[in-house]
Amino acid sequence: MDNKIITVNKILEICNGKLLMGNKELVINSYSKDTRNINCGDMYLGIKGERVNGNDYIESAFENGAVGCITDDEIDEKILNKFKNKVIIKVNDTVKAIQELAKYKRSMYDIPVIAVTGSVGKTSTKDIIANVLAQKYNVLKTEGNLNNHIGLPLTLLKLKDHTAVVVEMGMNHFGEISVLTNIAKPTGCVITNIGTSHIGNLGSRENILKAKLEILEGLSKDGFILINNDNDLLNDWAIKENDNKIYTYGIQNESTYMATNIIQSQDSSKFKINDIKASVPIGGIHFIYNAICAFAVGDILGIKTDKIIKGISEFKLTAKRMDIEIIKDNVKVINDSYNASYDSMKAALEVMGKTKANRKIAVLGNMLELGDYTKQLHEKVGEEVVKNKMDILITIGEYAEDIANRAEQLGMKNIFRFENINDAIELIKSYIKNGDLLLLKASNSMNFSKILEKIK
């Protein structure tokens, strides 16, 4: 008998729930919070969000095949009478219930669990680590950037016959990573960098470091931490830290794992990691860092070197993160519209600067959650626009005007400012021509992917 099964009775015990109806001995194997892609046999999770109350869709979940639901809301008598063969569990708070469930599920597995955090690069780093570990393990990983207090538990609840896990941990405020790491209980922690994302909430980069280091609270006693040694704050912290097993990776500062002999091209890079030849099929220095990091994790976990190199060389990006697409009239578009911070803007513009094109056009939008640093960091992006020799700058949004203003102060001429996407789309459609290179970069809520859809 599988000793990793979870019955309805066990869910009641873990979540301190009350069974309104259903079979206590029923085994639950999978969970879903979305009725649109629910599968037969799933336990539906009624979660109250800012805009949508998932408890309003319990009837729809049952009709689509859910075997039961966990809810923190009152259940309509009509549903109780209509679906007498279903399981309904009432809890005080569905989110806290699934967090406890995920913590229990995690405790059933004695396997490597790698947790990844950092100001930028979490998702691509998580993905390339998973690609390397997949050479030896059956890997469960965070899908996309489901890295918060709901996404991480839902990932861990998918554990079945997996032999390794790679999870991403995001945060906006103090205390959030603390919750995640105490659910995931990682055996290894990765911190990619400490930049300026969410500095408006946390007040300083030093506070961002403090919030990211909460990841160590859940680290197993014999676990390791791997940091980007070229990041100033992480470098300083590692020098002073004595309580954890620390590995470092980098290009500039002396590190446990180092890349040398770097040769970059538009869409790939070749280099050596500790004198071992490697290549990554995406351009940009930040993907070399990702590759060194993934090499380090693979090496620490005892994966054969040739397998690690294979995992790095076959890496593919998550959609909307430095996607490169050629559209009509041979216009190349770099779609990096999933999210934006100063650090990721800088990295994308550096890739643009090193890529050959007739004209380089940067379409940049607002960066959010920067608080008192909003004007300063947008102006710094303007400096990067000029430094990397963009031919044309198009800004969209109120904050992005500061990008344009600073670039103009530094002597850039071809600048266009827009308040909204629709007006910008009309200009871009009429303006782009054969051989152009176009960068789309902004915070996700700016909906820059719409630009690509409309100009194709």
Image (tube, helix red, strand yellow):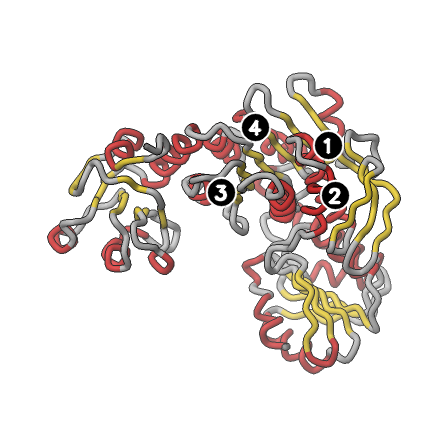
Which amino acid type corresponds to the residue marked 3 in the rendered image? Asn
Q: Rounded to the nearest whole Å, what is the CA distance between mark 1 and mark 3?
A: 24 Å
Residue 61 marker: none
Mark 1 residue crowding within 10 angstroms, few (<14) / some (14–19) / many (20+): some
Q: Rounded to the nearest whole Å, what is the CA distance between mark 3 and mark 2?
A: 24 Å
Q: Nearer the viewer, residue 20 or 204?
A: 20
Q: Is residue 376 visible?
A: no
- Dot 3 lies on which element? loop
The quadrant in which the C terminus is found is: bottom right
Q: Rounded to the nearest whole Å, what is the CA distance between mark 4 and mark 3?
A: 19 Å
Eye-nearest disc, 4 or 3? 4
Q: Which residue is mark 1?
A: 233
Which amino acid type corresponds to the residue marked 1 in the rendered image? Leu
Taking the spot 65% from the left edge, 59% from the top edge, the residue there is 336
Residue 289 marker: 2
Q: Rounded to the nearest whole Å, what is the CA distance between mark 4 and mark 1?
A: 23 Å
Eye-nearest disc, 1 or 2? 2
